[in-house]
Image (cartoon, rainbow, N blue to C red):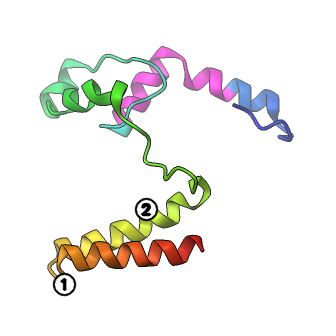
Amino acid sequence: MINEASPAKEAAATFIKWTLEPENQVKLQEILGASSVATVTKRSPEQLKETPFLTVFDDLTETSLPQIVQGFEAQTPDIRKIVVQNVIAALQGTVDLKTALDRAQQQATQQVG
């Protein structure tokens, strides 16, 4: 989707078409690792030998949901940062998980007003 107000619609369309070319989708898939791309790609034998677990993520692509907080799409990056920081604190043992998640909930609620 290209923003109607974009001053570079043609360039954006060219970029999207280039990105969707099969060889570029494969390269993007390799860069993204476990994330899916816009089209179905086939992983190389070399990549699967190095990271065989990626097929599990690939199998989940059809039923997975994006990590976007519905209703708070614009604030999702801020919410994600809050959650990750608190989970890391719990993983590092500086706080128990329940406290970390309660704090993340409180901080995220304050963030979105």
Location of residue 50 in the rendering, given as x and y in whole percent from the top left corner = 15, 33
Above or below, 17 against 4 in this view is above
Q: Foreground residue, 43 or 80?
A: 80
Numbered mark located on residue 57 in the image:
none
| Secondary element at image label 2 | helix
- Which amino acid lies under the numbered mark 2 shown in the image of this protein? Arg
Location of residue 109 in the rendering, given as x and y in whole percent from the top left corner = 49, 73
Which residue appears at 34% of the width and 72% of the height? 85
- The answer to if 19 sits in the magenta stretch is yes
Numbered mark located on residue 80 in the image:
2
User: In the rendered view, does 3 fall on the left or right side of 38?
Assistant: right
User: In the rendered view, does 103 fall on the left or right side of 37?
Assistant: left
- Split into 4 quadrants, where in the image is the N terminus? top right
- Split into 4 quadrants, where in the image is the C terminus? bottom right
Tag 2 and tag 1, C-beta contact below 8 Å: no
- Which amino acid lies under the numbered mark 1 shown in the image of this protein? Thr
Classify 10 Å Cα crowding around label 2: few (below 14), some (14-19), many (20 and above): some
Residue 91 sits in quarter: bottom left
Location of residue 78 in the rendering, given as x and y in whole percent from the top left corner = 51, 66
Above or below, 108 against 21 in this view is below
Classify 10 Å Cα crowding around label 1: few (below 14), some (14-19), many (20 and above): few
Q: Which residues are magenta?
A: 15-31
Numbered mark located on residue 94 in the image:
1
- The answer to if 34 sits in the magenta stretch is no
Above or below, 31 against 38 in this view is below
| Secondary element at image label 1 | loop
Name which of mark 2 and mark 1 comes first in the sequence: 2
